[in-house]
Amino acid sequence: MTTGAARRLALAGWPVIVGLVAVLPWLGLNSATIRLVLLIAILSMVVSGLNLTLGYAGELALGQVPLYAAGAYTTGYLAINVIDDLLVCLLAAVAVAVLLGVVTGLPGLRLGGWALAITSFFVVLLIPSVVNIFGDRLGGLEGLNGIPVPTLLGSELGDNGFYVVVILVTAAWFAVFRNIVVSRHGAAFLVLKQSPVLATAIGTSPFATKVTVYALSAVPAGIAGCFIAYLDAYLSPLTFGLELAIVILAAAILGGATSVYGAIVGAAIMEIGPLRITVFDQYALVVYGAFLIAGGLLLRNGLAGVTERLGRKAAARLRRRSGPAGDAAPAEPPAAVTFPAVDGLALTVSGVSKRFGGNLAVDDVSFEAGPGRITALVGPNGSGKTTLMNLISGYYSLDGGTIRLGDQVISGLPAHQVARRGVGRTFQTPLIPQGLTVMDAIVTGRFARHRISLAESALRLPRHWKALDAERRTGRQIMESLGLARQAGTPAADLALGTRRMLELGRAIAGGSSLVLLDEVASGLDEDDIHGLVRVLTSMRDAGITILLVEHNFALVRALADTIVVLAEGRVIATGSPDEIASHPEVVQTYLGQGGEIAGTRVADELLDTEKADRA
Ligand SMILES: Nc1ncnc2c1ncn2[C@@H]1O[C@H](COP(=O)(O)OP(=O)(O)OP(=O)(O)O)[C@@H](O)[C@H]1O
């Protein structure tokens, strides 16, 4: 069975499973088992929120417990004092949890890693104090008693009615959660987890993505809080303590933090496991800690990861049996590469300067890179090439001058806005996100310029399907042109360096970029890879893209570039055609004489001959 078929089967199976679970009370199950199912549903929702922040976005924001408590106390307070309608309390619980999620997540916009983890854990310790401060309304440390049974639209919900609502809402949340993580928004979370620099290069704002993740992860926590308040009819601040935080973390790690259904599996283990251990109360933290360590040490991406790897192995075995050409087949350089025509825009760099402390890294640099041309930026180490690339991409702010793309000034814009205006780029060390296939990683390059809202993806609205269709079509075209078609389903992180560089090129052009910045794109490539690269770059140029190439291999630059700009100590010392630059006395003295003509010369000489023949 292919991965696609397995996915379709899982999709069709989901309503059946939900239907079966929803009718359990009518199948004669005792109330303890029904309560256990409810507790698993509630915990799995809280865990899914942690999976979103930690597993998908890589944010060590561990504050699910306060969000859960916020949902629970909002419901408790409203149901006792204002209105006991489940729908109203549910919406209010989600609203309060989301607000708290964004506010407590704010440190995450500045802090990262363990500082954020410790801060978010600290918020957990505040819960009893906060509840105590509002003691007269929230019941203080003795707890909030007397939460009434819920009503829905004026009628009282019986036990079974409440059970069905919990199961259906949980199922609906997991459907939305799945839709989001398999959509481009989920891919954007994984990209942010890998690198904020890459996130901006594909046109997403790390700030907006983080706020979205904090808000989104609070939704299931708020819902779960509402349900636990009604289920127990009593709330104690001691329930929402460190022990619960560890249970949630252990469930996420054990089930698989980068997984949708892993949250349910992890929650089930954490709810059912303790029932089998009689001395549990005494050793609860030890048991939870053991689960956490076992999950973290023994399982890569938890039980979901184990299942996925087994599934992948079985699928590969089946493919081997049914014929050649698997996903792991090596990339094939295409015989002829063509890209759709692009309206390239001229890049104009005027009087640009950048200072790092006392070091003037870029000093009054001016040059122009025209559409449908390859402009190379060369110079000795430390001459300012990468700094210039970063200034053009918007990663650094300028200390002087302006940068224009076509008629638009792009200097001063944040990096993700520069990407959205049609600037694609590759990196000296390729940035390849974990958890995405080659196809998925390439189409992230479209996010900058073809935008779809979170709601459209979560609810699978028509624009989502249209965008997905266009994404797949463009992705397939690019992969064929780059010789990556047979690797579409391969995890991108498994690729060799040469193929990674091809993938970065594909990502840089996927959105129809007018300007592509290539930072040492040939570095570390063997002769075959360089041949493939030259074919791709010349086709990109022929398609009309403006290409700015930073490269140390001068022979290769000479073969490829239409114009060469030479930098030394941050200043332009020469601009001209490859032949003019190769015989420029100052360039020969400051750069080429120092080993500019280095590795790859033989390949490049061959290329030079072919290129010259082509041009003649
Ligand atoms: N973030 C930074 N902070 C401080 N100094 C920096 C920073 N980035 C670059 N520099 C300095 O700016 C100067 C230009 O560096 P840059 O990396 O742009 O050169 P380069 O031509 O790309 O070199 P290479 O070919 O080795 O990549 C160097 O002196 C470098 O030390």
Image (cartoon, rainbow, N blue to C red):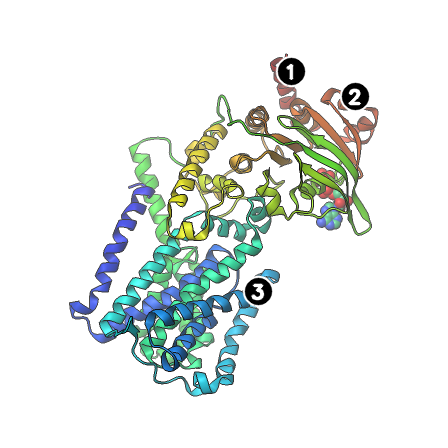
Q: Which residue is mark 2?
A: 583
- Between marks 2 and 3 in the image, the one whose residue lies nearer the viewer: 3
The answer to whether residue 271 is above or below residue 301 is below
Location of residue 545 in the rendering, given as x and y in whole percent from the top left corner: 59, 29
The answer to whether residue 248 is above or below residue 5 is below
- Identify the image quadrant of the N terminus: top left
Location of residue 161 in the rendering, given as x and y in whole percent from the top left corner: 24, 70
Determine whether the residue tagged by mark 2 lies in a helix, strand or loop. Answer: loop
Q: Residues within 10 Å of mark 2 (few under 14, many from 20)?
A: few
Q: Nearer the viewer, residue 284 or 519?
A: 519
Image disc number at residue 106? 3
Residue 236 sits in which quadrant? bottom left
Q: Amino acid at mark 3?
A: Leu
The answer to whether residue 229 is above or below residue 393 is below
- Decide if ligand 1 comes within 8 Å of the CB at mark 1: no
Q: CA distance from mark 2 to mark 3?
A: 56 Å
Location of residue 220 in the rendering, given as x and y in whole percent from the top left corner: 40, 64
Image disc number at residue 612? 1
Q: Are marks 2 and 3 in contact (CB under 8 Å)?
A: no
Say left or right for 13 vs 558. Answer: left
User: In what quadrant does ligand 1 lie?
Assistant: top right
Q: Are marks 1 and 3 in contact (CB under 8 Å)?
A: no
Q: Amino acid at mark 2?
A: Ser
